[in-house]
């Protein structure tokens, strides 16, 4: 092979990483623009909630008493539970909150909150402004528990059956339509869930 041919071939190969990068960047841009985050799959559906213990939000009180934090054991007490991952800095969480309150009332199930990467003062101010529908609020200062739950971004809402298994995941803020077409039917399905066999 001549020196000229070697140069031509090597210069052609030098563009290969650039072409691969551009192809991947184009694919990601398409996915971000046209992809629906609500259709992102969750590997945790049908699985027990991750093991965790979250401390309470410092100074968050209801009826003069500290609102407790919670753990995975609190979500396996024989009845369906709702878990909402939220933060005061999350704009969609502000928009979602009235619908979250309505959903909890219509579902008639306890609502637990995971406060993600938030300052206690801001979390307290948020719930003081909009109302506190949570029976317990755990503070996830570094977001590690949220990651274990497979959270892509706040807000996200989970439905957990009475045996502590995640049966449904809603990505993004809840809307009026979501309550009636997705969430309440998912709660009813969770209430019909069968006890897992000892081997599972």
Image: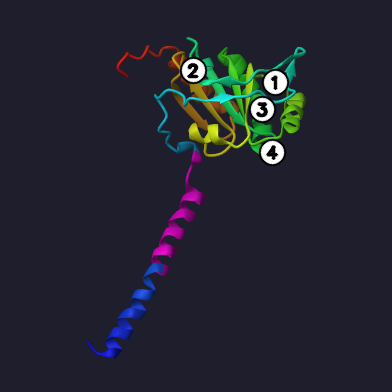
> Where does residue 58 sit, x and y in percent of width and height?
72, 25
> Please, what secondary structure does the residue beneath circle 1 have?
loop
Q: Which disc number belongs to residue 116?
A: none
Q: Nearer the viewer, mark 2 or mark 4?
A: 4
Residue with the most extreme left position: 1
- How busy is the neighbourhood of tag 4: few (under 14 within 10 Å), some, or many (20 plus)? some
- How busy is the neighbourhood of tag 2: few (under 14 within 10 Å), some, or many (20 plus)? many
Tell me what residue is drawn at x 64 percent, y 23 percent: 137
Ranked by sequence position, the earlier of labels 2 and 4 is 4
> Where does residue 144 sit, x and y in percent of width and height?
55, 35
Q: Which disc number belongs to residue 187?
A: 2
Tell me what residue is drawn at x 51 percent, y 19 percent: 184
Q: Is residue 129 left or right of residue 156?
A: right
Q: Nearer the viewer, mark 4 or mark 3?
A: 4
> Please, what secondary structure does the residue beneath circle 2 have?
helix
Residue where numbered disc 3 is placed = 97
Q: Is residue 19 magenta?
A: yes
- How busy is the neighbourhood of tag 3: few (under 14 within 10 Å), some, or many (20 plus)? many
Residue where numbered disc 4 is placed = 89
Ranked by sequence position, the earlier of labels 2 and 3 is 3
> Please, what secondary structure does the residue beneath circle 3 have?
helix
In the rendered structure, which segment of residues is drawn in magenta? 18-37
140, 178: nearer the viewer: 140
> Please, what secondary structure does the residue beneath circle 4 have?
loop
Residue where numbered disc 1 is placed = 132
- How busy is the neighbourhood of tag 1: few (under 14 within 10 Å), some, or many (20 plus)? many
70, 27: nearer the viewer: 70
The quarter of the picture where residue 165 lies is top left
């Amino acid at each position: 092979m001549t020196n000229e041919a070697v140069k031509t071939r090597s210069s052609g190969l030098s563009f290969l990483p650039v072409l691969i990068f551009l192809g991947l960047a184009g694919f990601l841009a398409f996915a971000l623009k046209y992809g629906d985050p609500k259709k992102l799959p969750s590997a945790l559906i049908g699985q027990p909630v991750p093991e965790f213990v979250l401390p309470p939000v410092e100074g968050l009180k209801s009826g003069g008493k500290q609102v407790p934090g919670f753990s995975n054991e609190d979500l396996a007490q024989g009845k369906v539970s709702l878990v909402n991952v939220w933060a005061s800095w999350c704009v969609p969480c502000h928009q979602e909150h009235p619908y979250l309150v309505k959903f909890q009332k219509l579902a008639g199930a306890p609502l637990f909150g995971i406060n993600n990467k938030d300052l206690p003062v801001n979390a307290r101010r948020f719930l003081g402004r909009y109302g506190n529908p949570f029976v317990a609020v755990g503070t996830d200062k570094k977001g590690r528990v949220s990651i274990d739950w497979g959270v892509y971004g706040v807000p996200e809402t989970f439905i957990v059956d009475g045996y502590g298994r995640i049966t449904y995941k809603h990505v993004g803020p809840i809307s009026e339509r979501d309550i009636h077409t997705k969430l309440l039917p998912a709660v009813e399905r969770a209430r019909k869930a069968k006890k897992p066999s000892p081997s599972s």
